[in-house]
Image (spheres, rainbow, N blue to C red):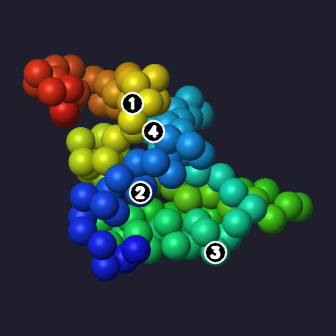
C-alpha cells in the first residue's frame, strides 16, 4: 500500500475516513480536528504511516486510560486544509461539516471559497 500511487493512497485514506473518521470541533479548545478512533492500534499505526507518506504528521494517542481505544488525529491548520483539498470526505455531510468548522475557527482565512469548494 505504501508504494502505491499518491492517488490510490489518497483514495484509501478517503474511504477509511468516510467509514470511521469524522471532523470534530472542540469548543473548549476552539480547534478543529479530523479523527478516527479504534481498538485496532496496528491498523491506526498503518493509517498514520500512510498519511505520513502523503506529507501529513498525524498524532496517534490513547483515547481512554481505562480502555484500549486509540485515536488518529490530524490537527495542524495546514494539514486540515490539505486534507480538505487533497483527500476530503466522499460523504458530502462530512466534507461540509469540515468546511463549516474551518470557517468557524478561522473566519478571516476561510471566509471565501473558489468554485471547486477548495480553500
Residue 42 badge: 3
Sequence-earlier tag: 1 or 2: 2
| Residue tagged 2 | 12
Q: Is label 3 in a helix, a strand or a loop? A: helix
Residue 106 visible to the viewer: yes
CA separation in Å, label 1 and label 2? 16 Å
* 111 vs 75: above or below: above
Q: Furthest-left residue in view?
A: 114
* 1 vs 110: above or below: below
Sequence-earlier tag: 3 or 4: 4
CA separation in Å, label 4 and label 2? 22 Å
Q: Is label 4 in a helix, a strand or a loop? A: strand
Q: Nearer the viewer, residue 19 or 96?
A: 19
User: Dots 1 and 2: beta carbons under 8 Å?
Assistant: no
| Residue tagged 4 | 32
Q: Residues within 10 Å of mark 3 (few under 14, many from 20)?
A: few
* Mark 4 or mark 1, whichever is nearer to me: 1
| Residue tagged 1 | 95
Sequence-earlier tag: 3 or 1: 3
Q: Furthest-bottom residue in view?
A: 3
* Mark 3 or mark 4, whichever is nearer to me: 3
Residue 51 x/y as whole percent: 39, 65
Q: Judge left or right: residue 108 versus residue 48.
A: left
Number of callouts? 4
Residue 89 x/y as whole percent: 40, 38
Q: Residue at x 64, y 74 (%)?
A: 42
Q: Quadrant of residue 57?
A: bottom left
Residue 55 x/y as whole percent: 28, 67
Q: Residue at x 56, y 29 (%)?
A: 27
Q: Residue at x 25, y 58 (%)?
A: 7
User: Dots 3 and 1: beta carbons under 8 Å?
Assistant: no
Amino acid at each position: 500500500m505504501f508504494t502505491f500511487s499518491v492517488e490510490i493512497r489518497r483514495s484509501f485514506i478517503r474511504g477509511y475516513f468516510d467509514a470511521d473518521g469524522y471532523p470534530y470541533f472542540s469548543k473548549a479548545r476552539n480547534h478543529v480536528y479530523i479523527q478516527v478512533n479504534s481498538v485496532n492500534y496496528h491498523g491506526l499505526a498503518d493509517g498514520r504511516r500512510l498519511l505520513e507518506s502523503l506529507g501529513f504528521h498525524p498524532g496517534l494517542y490513547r483515547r481512554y486510560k481505562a480502555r484500549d481505544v486509540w485515536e488518529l488525529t490530524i490537527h495542524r491548520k495546514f494539514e486540515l486544509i490539505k486534507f480538505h483539498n487533497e483527500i476530503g470526505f466522499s460523504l458530502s455531510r462530512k466534507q461540509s461539516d469540515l468546511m463549516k468548522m474551518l470557517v468557524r475557527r478561522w473566519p478571516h482565512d476561510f471566509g471565501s471559497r473558489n468554485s471547486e469548494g477548495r480553500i
